[in-house]
Image (spheres, rainbow, N blue to C red):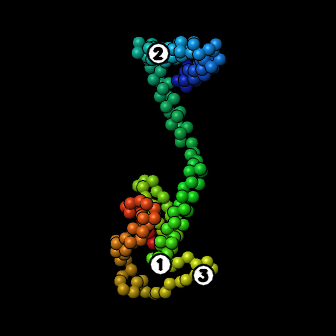
């Protein structure tokens, strides 16, 4: 086998294209099934010859070397590929913005505003980032500034109770028509 695996695949591909062109421009539909049968046998024969040589021992090591070289080339080239999913990013951002707008009124009922929404696929869920206060254009409210330990009625490192956002999570899940387990609320 004096040529590489890639060249072998190219030749088969070219043969298939030519065969389908011949099939397309053939005399009529009455011969189509016979031509397809003949083309199928010819493609199988092209695949069978190198594998027959490999099994019978003729150039057995050469085909494995070529297959390994081809695999290495693919792995090297795969590292250079940059996947750009711009359309998916646009759709994802539009979905996140739509969810943010839908949840804004519900969050306002609890005295919060939705700052950001993120849709995750692994693990699946919707992460809603909220912050205290209602969104007002042109006006900024600053909370009371404390110097010292941090919180008035507790130490600075204490975690908030787990059930703090349960009712808000229930409202969000009703609006989005999804299970509460998929909604994560984080306050900034």
Q: Residue 152 in the image: state x and y as whole percent.
A: 39, 87
Q: Secondary structure at mark 3?
A: loop
Disc nearer the start of the sequence (2/3): 2
Which residue is under mark 3? 139
Q: Which mark is residue 43?
A: none
Q: Secondary structure at mark 1?
A: loop
Q: Residue 19 in the image: state x and y as whole percent.
A: 59, 18
Asked whether the residues under the numbered discs 2 and 3 touch, taking CB atoms below 8 Å apart as contact, a structural biologist would say no
Residue 58 visible in the current orientation: yes
Q: Nearer the viewer, residue 187 or 23?
A: 23
Which residue is under mark 1? 111
Q: Secondary structure at mark 2?
A: helix
In the image, residue 147 sits, relative to residue 92, either above or below, namely below
Q: Nearer the viewer, residue 61 or 42?
A: 42
Residue at (46% x, 57% y) in the render:
120
Measured Cα–Cα span from mark 1 to mark 2: 72 Å
Residue at (50% x, 33% y) in the render:
72
* Viewer-side label of 1, 2: 1
- The mark total stands at 3
Measured Cα–Cα span from mark 2 to mark 3: 77 Å
Q: Residue 121 in the image: state x and y as whole percent.
A: 45, 53
Residue 39 visible in the current orientation: no
Which residue is under mark 2? 48
Q: Tell whether 60 sits left or right of 32.
A: left
Bin the neighbour count of mark 3 within 10 Å (Cα to Cα): few under 14, some 14-19, many 20 and up.
few
* Viewer-side label of 3, 1: 1
Measured Cα–Cα span from mark 3 to mark 1: 16 Å
């Amino acid at each position: 086998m004096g040529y590489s695996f890639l060249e072998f695949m190219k030749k088969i591909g070219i043969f298939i294209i030519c065969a389908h062109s011949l099939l397309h421009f053939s005399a009529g539909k009455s011969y189509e099934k016979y031509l397809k049968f003949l083309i199928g046998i010819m493609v199988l024969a092209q695949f069978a010859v190198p594998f027959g040589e490999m099994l019978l021992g003729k150039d057995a090591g050469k085909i494995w070397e070529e297959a390994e070289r081809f695999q290495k080339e693919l792995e090297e080239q795969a590292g250079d590929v940059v996947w750009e999913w711009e359309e998916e990013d646009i759709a994802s951002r539009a979905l996140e913005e739509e969810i943010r707008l839908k949840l804004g009124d519900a969050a306002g009922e609890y005295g919060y505003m939705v700052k950001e929404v993120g849709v995750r696929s692994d693990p699946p869920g919707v992460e809603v980032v909220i912050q205290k206060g209602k969104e007002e254009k042109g006006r900024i409210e600053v909370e009371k500034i404390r110097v010292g330990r941090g919180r008035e009625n507790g130490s600075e490192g204490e975690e908030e109770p787990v059930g703090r956002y349960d009712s808000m999570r229930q409202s969000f899940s009703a609006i989005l028509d999804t299970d509460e387990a998929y909604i994560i609320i984080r306050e900034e």
